[in-house]
Image: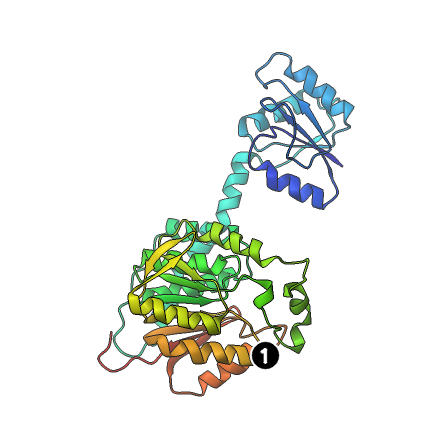
Amino acid sequence: MRVLVFPLDMDKVIGFIKNANALNIEVVGASSVMNNGDGFQIHAFHKLPFVTDAGFEAIFCELISTYSITHVYTPHGAVWSYLSNLKKKHVEHLPFSLCEPSPYNSDWLDLQPSYKWAECLLADDIVEQIELPGKVNVHKKLTKGQYASLHRQFLSISGQCDELKLLALSHIFRVLPKGDLVEIGSFSGRSAFAIGWLASVYKIGNLVSVDPWDNSKLEDQGEGAEILNKELNKGSEVIDLNKIFWSYIGAISLLNNAGYIKDISEKAIDDYTKASSVGFLDSPELGRISLTGKIAMLHIDGNHRYDYVCKDIDAWEPFVMPGGWVLLDDYVWAFGDGPKKTGDELLLTEKFDVAFTMSDTLFLRKCQQKGEV
């Protein structure tokens, strides 16, 4: 296979070329605006006139023949229509396949899953079905467009937090009290973005991400996690956590209610308490956010070794307010049972009045005292 990408000067071609290279498919780039293909991982570059130019057809046909092009990809709607008609006109002399669907249909197909996800969420009455002890203010659901936009942006951020967990988060925020949101282990920021965005829309509070983003500060996650331990150790060539930090910044910076503490959890708790005592946290790159010292949602997704999960609970759970929620990520985990053991122990306490699992996460609601809302 050899594919022609035209015009090369549209942003959608970047992902297409990346996928083609991963499949060892040769890519020839062409543009009517650019003079070269510098910066693109392509086999060759060719300058083409605009499709409205009288000489375009002959030059294009020659290019197809010269490079033995088997497929043509274009993200430009008008160009796609032109090439589709040109192929029909010269069906015997232009044996290439025009990549489908058309850009117009492709854009809709890209967005359609987000609308379907939003419709499923809107049809789901989890909050109404859960018996929440005490008086609880239940916020109304968001619009289909808001949920679809959240879903689409969420999926654009790298991470392992899945759509089912996003659905659960979207429901839980309807019954959260006002307070701080704390996430231990944010990595590239997928779940952090969702938590911060939902907190902003519902005016719950501000998000603090706790993560060292430093390979040298990490400890192993137990015997069952050898693969992860090798990926994240100090000399790893697989994952550079400094780069992951900048991925997080890129994912979260459009929010105005997010900050971070760049350290391991057991040390970050001191920074959180100090920041809460003065009422604000300053984060380089993100600025200043206010803090209350009362946590409405605690999302624990740090080191999954049993003793470390216990440390996270011991340090941070006391700050979770009545009616607030504790989320234990990877309650079901392929590399160990630290979160599950800790979660099962929490279930045996009398601190939580609601518990359920969705995706791989255990959701726990802290008991609400009588008369509290």
Of 30 and 217, nearer the camera is: 217
Q: For the residue carrying disc 1, how many other residues have a C-alpha within 10 Å: few (<14), some (14-19), or many (20+)?
A: some
Residue 52, position as x, y percentages in the image? 57, 16
Residue 126, position as x, y percentages in the image? 39, 68
Residue drawn at (45%, 72%), measured in percent from left and top? Answer: 327
Q: Determine which quarter of the picture holds residue 241.
A: bottom right
Residue 166 vs 363, above or below: the answer is: above
| Residue 27 as seen in the image, left or right of residue 310 | right
Residue drawn at (45%, 84%), measured in percent from left and top? Answer: 347
Residue drawn at (49%, 57%), measured in percent from left and top? Answer: 189
Q: Is residue 162 visible?
A: yes
Q: Which residue was labeled with disc 1?
A: 337
Residue drawn at (45%, 88%), measured in percent from left and top? Answer: 348
Q: What residue type is labelled 1?
A: Asp
Residue 246 vs 97, above or below: the answer is: below
Q: Determine which quarter of the picture holds residue 8.
A: top right
Residue 270, position as x, y percentages in the image? 41, 72
